[in-house]
Image (spheres, rainbow, N blue to C red):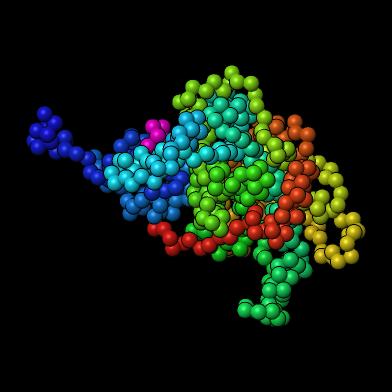
Amino acid sequence: MLPKLRAQSPDYREAASHYSAHDASSAAISIDREKCIKCGRCVEVCQDVQKMNVLGWFSRGRERHVGVFCDSDVSASACISCGQCASVCPVGAISERPQWRQVLELLESKRKRTFLPESRRRAPLVSPVARLWWRRQLLWAEPRVMVVQTAPATRVAIGEELGLAPGAVATGQMVAGLRALGFDYVFDTNFSADLTIMEEGTELLARLRANAAGRSPPDAAATAAAAGPAGGAGPAAPAAAAAPPPPLPMFTSCCPGWVNLVEQEYSDFIPHLSSCKSPQQMMGTVIKIIWAPKAGLKPEDVVVVSLMPCTAKKFEAARPEMTSPGGGRHVDFVLTTRELGRMLRLNRVPALSLPPSGYDSPMATTTGAAVIFGNSGGVAEAAVRTLYELVTGQELPRLEFQELRGLQGIKHATIQLPAPAPAPEPGAAAPAPSELRIAVVNGIANARRLLDALRAGAAPPLDFVEVMTCPGGCIGGGGQPKSRDPGVLAKRMQAIYSIDEAATIRRSHANPEVAALYARSSLESPSSPAAHALLHTSYRDRSKEHIT
């Protein structure tokens, strides 16, 4: 009957190809237009809230649909993978690029332990179906060590997926649920957040001192002088010694959506970005490069899964800069908080009924400064707690900086730094800053305002700028549970600060396991050549790689 109706009336004809298309070209976002109810929420949040103008309306009448500029794929657009469109979609037409099925398959393979004989492994298979079956069986035959790391903001949001009220802290239940799914090790990304502060704080201090002295940082200048001309030893070129200091203000680099915006639309600010990897990527590097060999494991046998509140973390993990020299990724899979909730429900894991579980050692000791990374202003506050003592040599009189907290789009603060104690080393005569001028930004629209003001010279003098793509920071990430509660961000933020207040250690540089990592590995010290090789990255101009 349906073919006859289609032949007689255009109302029954098949929809245009663009309507039924499933766009999975992005590493972070997936669009299924067959589910779209044309409510326009995604367009509104993209155009009016984030000011990205990637999503819009195309065609007219029955053919009207949501798409990206020129009706092209998401990967060809200026999308920064923030995922706010997915967080407001009521029907799942836009969602994070799912990876939970692949992770569940690997976890299931650990339980089945299907080992094939050598003759079967090398059997020539011609049929595509048989080849796919053989590859899956071979994957199951390989023993894999499943490791998962959890971001700070996930512990105050996963409870909403389990039926708890917004803002409930469910760290122990989350870890217990991950162990019940079959993960061998559960690590806390808070550890690498402390590591990030050590690296980022040292980098910021070097920039401040270099700009005060009007020269490049000592370590960079020494490296340039020691390198000499290409092809052999000898004195460095005169221009290398006169290298200008790195620019201020220094931007944080923890948020991959923010990094995407700078690379794609504000490439002239790339030198302002901190070279530090994000805590997710630092943790993946430490697990595969440092922890795995000490645990008697090969890095290629370790599968690192990240539990993140952010969809852009999926894009970040796939960046070519985030791979080992052999080509292996430091983070293999990224799951959002929503994906973990789906996995727990699908496997009927009663996470709330399980005894609370703790994180695995080493890297189990974390600080309150690390957990506040999940809030807007948290990275800046954690940096101040460490930088103050690095500069002054004195104990910080207060640990809470209310001027850096809250849900305001742009916050400014100036932190006074008393005169430092006499330097114990005779060679450390670099000038120390007397104050730290900070801006804290959340939301891409607000980030654009600040960047445009900096370009025009209309912004106040700044030393350090923290930017998070999503409203409220990571607590409002594109992969967090959807909520109708208008106060959900404030409740999650308060829960994060309550964890900080209850923490035994609240300053990143006081974390004994971070100090032990530097002392017992090749890292040696923050911003050492070895630490820079493993824990830092680079950026590139991608302004011509997308349609604008």
Q: Residue 29: within the magenta?
A: no
- Return the residue nearer the eye: 349 or 251: 349
Which residue is at 48% across, 25% downward? 347
> Taking the image as drawn, is residue 483 in sight?
no
- Return the residue nearer the eye: 86 or 241: 241
Which residue is at 35% across, 42% downward? 132
Q: Position of residue 91 (x, y in %)?
A: 38, 32
Q: Position of residue 89 (x, y in %)?
A: 42, 35
100 left or right of 210 in image: left
361 left or right of 138 in image: right
Residue at the far top: name it: 353
Q: Position of residue 410 (x, y in %)?
A: 62, 47
Q: Position of residue 226 (x, y in %)?
A: 72, 73
As displayed, is residue 406 above or below residue 461?
above
Residue at the far front: name it: 119
Q: Quadrant of residue 120?
A: top left
As displayed, is residue 395 above or below residue 500?
below
Which range of residues does the magenta coloring cover? 88-93
Q: Total of numbered circles in the picture?
A: 0
As displayed, is residue 143 above or below residue 483?
below
- Return the residue nearer the eye: 435 or 278: 278
Which residue is at 67% across, 62% downward? 248
Which residue is at 51% across, 42% downward? 333
Placement of the N terminus among the 4 image quadrants: top left
> Taking the image as drawn, is residue 328 in sight?
yes
501 left or right of 308 in image: right
**Magenta stretch secondary structure, dominant:** loop
Placement of the C terminus among the 4 image quadrants: bottom left
